[in-house]
Structure formats: structure tokens, C-alpha cells
Amino acid sequence: MAMDKSSADYYVYARASGMLARSFVGESARKLFNAASLQELWSLLFSEDLPQVPEILLARQIELKAQKTFIDDYLSLVSCYEKPSPMLVALLHFYDYDNIKEIGGALCLGEKSMPDIVDIRPFNIIDYSKWPSISAMTEGTPLAWLNAVPRLEQQKDNDYRLDCQYISEVWESIRTVSPQCRKSLEALVGEKYRMDNIMWALRLRTYYGMDRASVMSHLAYAGPHRSVQDVLARDAIRTLDWELDSWEQWKGWKYSMFLNPYEEGTVWSIDPRWVASAYRNAFVSRALATFHKFPFTEAPLVCWFVIKQRELDNIRTACEHLRLHMNSSASISQALHIAGLEVK
């Protein structure tokens, strides 16, 4: 039931706090990786009876149910407001952008049935009832430029444009939040997208050998112009001329606390996976601090959204680990590291 903003702020903060207390993030994520089977993982996550499906399908069921629970919970919280903040709705549009990627791919391949989508009604910007006309689905929306079935060779460019557009929507929406928490949310969300760019740049250079210009063309920018001073891309761009195996160049980096360890006299090269894992728990801790710093503003729900997305990543990692029957100590250590957890 929708409430006035003041009442909704108090109710949402209390309810979201309880949900986060039960979340599998930070050290609590370790419980996911202590599960000995997919059946045990299901029981840890859900109160419903275990579905009678083959184990090969159970991992997918766990992932889908966890995602649906997340979306349903977020929708229930946002719907408490008569007029939700544009930022709270913009975050939710992540799934519209993701859905239209899947729809474009399905239409390109001649699929007759609409692919499974994440339902975010009543906050969707895409009219899914107009399937299979992609132009009708996006007409009158910020995605109206996607008005024809994309060719296979267009998919990559379209996906990149959609990613940039979503990030721009979220970034612009920060301007609409309460003045008392605007700077903190700008710092939190900005750091997330800056680190996403950094990690993407590292992967492109390490695994694909891309040069500076190629990497820059794959980064996400806050504005329409690919400026080297763009607030979301500049930190990644500054590292593009640094040698990947030069500790001397990286040790003074502003994010050096996330680097894989260096030992004097040994060969060192930056490890993108290590950087990503080290950053994840730090980001969750920062989001939790921001959640509690501004209790009766948009901040708690913004933080709740990004923290619970991290929880979904942890659940997917645990599912994959169990699905592949990776029970060795080495594989368990790797799964914990991906989740940003130390091996004990």
C-alpha cells in the first residue's frame, strides 16, 4: 500500500534493515559455500519444499527463484511510495535493458516465442504485450531508437549502447535525490561504475590484448562524449598506458589496496580477478555504511538494491560451484575468493 513519503521512509528503512540482516553478503556469504549440495543450498535460501527436478536443473531453479525473490522484494519496497524517487525506478530499469537485449537476440534468430523476461511491472518502460514488434515495444520510450530487429553483427554495438544508456539514466537520476544524501550516493554509485570500467579495461587488456583506443571504445561514460576526463571513465583511462606486469607503476594507484600481493624478487602481473574480488566486499561494506548513515532518504533502498545484487552474484557462484561438483579445497578456495572472502 502506497504511503506519504515520510511514512514510507520510516517503514522502508525498518523493513529493508531486516532483509539485509538476513542477506548472504560479506562474511555471511560464507554459509553459501559451506553448503554440501544444491539441495542443502535450496534449504538454506528458501522455506518452500525442494522442487522435484533433476539436479542438473536445480541450480537454474535456485538462481531464478533467488532473482525473483529479489525483484519482488524490491518492488514491494518501492511501491510503498506514492511517487517513488526517479533513482529508485532507474535502478530497476536494469532489467528492462537486459530484457530488450534478450528480445533483440531472440528476434534476430527467428524465435517465435518471447524469451523469459524479468517482470518489473508497473515500472517497466517496455510494452512487452506488443511482442513480436520490437518497434511497438519501445515506441515512445527512451529505447525508441531500437525500432527494428537487429542483425547478428549489430548485437554487440546495441548491447554496448544499452549499457551506456542505463548507466547514464542512473547517473542522471542521482540529481533528483534528497540533498542530504546526494553526495554520498554520487560517491557510492560513481565508484561502482568507475571500478566496473577499471575491471573491464583490465580484462580487455589482459585476456584480449586490446590497445588503448580499443579499450576506450568499450568503456561506459557518464555523458554522450567519450572524454578522457569523463567522471566514470577517467580512472580506467589513466591506467591504460601502465604495463600490466609493472608493480612500480601500479603500487601508487589510488585503488592499490585491491591489487594482488607483490613479493620482492618475484614476477608480478596484475590479476583482474583478484582486483574484482577484493573490491566486492569493500563495496558492500561501504554500501552498508551509507545505508545506515542516511536512514530516511532514498539512500537505504539504493544501497539495498546494490547489496542484494551482490548477494545474487554470490548465490550464482555457489550454484555453479555445486553444479560442477567442485569439492576440492582448491576449488572451494577459488569460489570463496570470487566472493571476496578469505580462505580460513
Image (cartoon, rainbow, N blue to C red):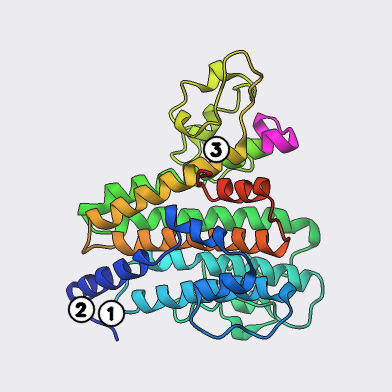
Quadrant including the N terminus: bottom left
Indicate which label's residue lies in the foreground, 1 or 3.
3
- Amino acid marked by disc 1: Glu
The residue at the point 48 percent across, 57 percent down is 29
Specify which label sits upstream in the sequence, 2 or 1. Answer: 2
Residue 125 visible, this angle: no
Which residue corresponds to mark 3?
275
Q: Is residue 82 above or below residue 209?
A: below
Residue 158 screen position, x and y as percent: 67, 58
State the residue position of label 2.
4
Mark 1, residue position: 82
Magenta: predominant secondary structure element?
helix
What amino acid type is highlighted by mark number 3? Answer: Val
Residue 153, x across and y down, in percent: 79, 56
Residue located 39% across and 54% down the image: 172
Write down the region rendered in magenta: 204-213
The alpha-carbon separation of the residues under discs 2 and 3 comes to: 43 Å
Residue extending furthest left?
Answer: 6
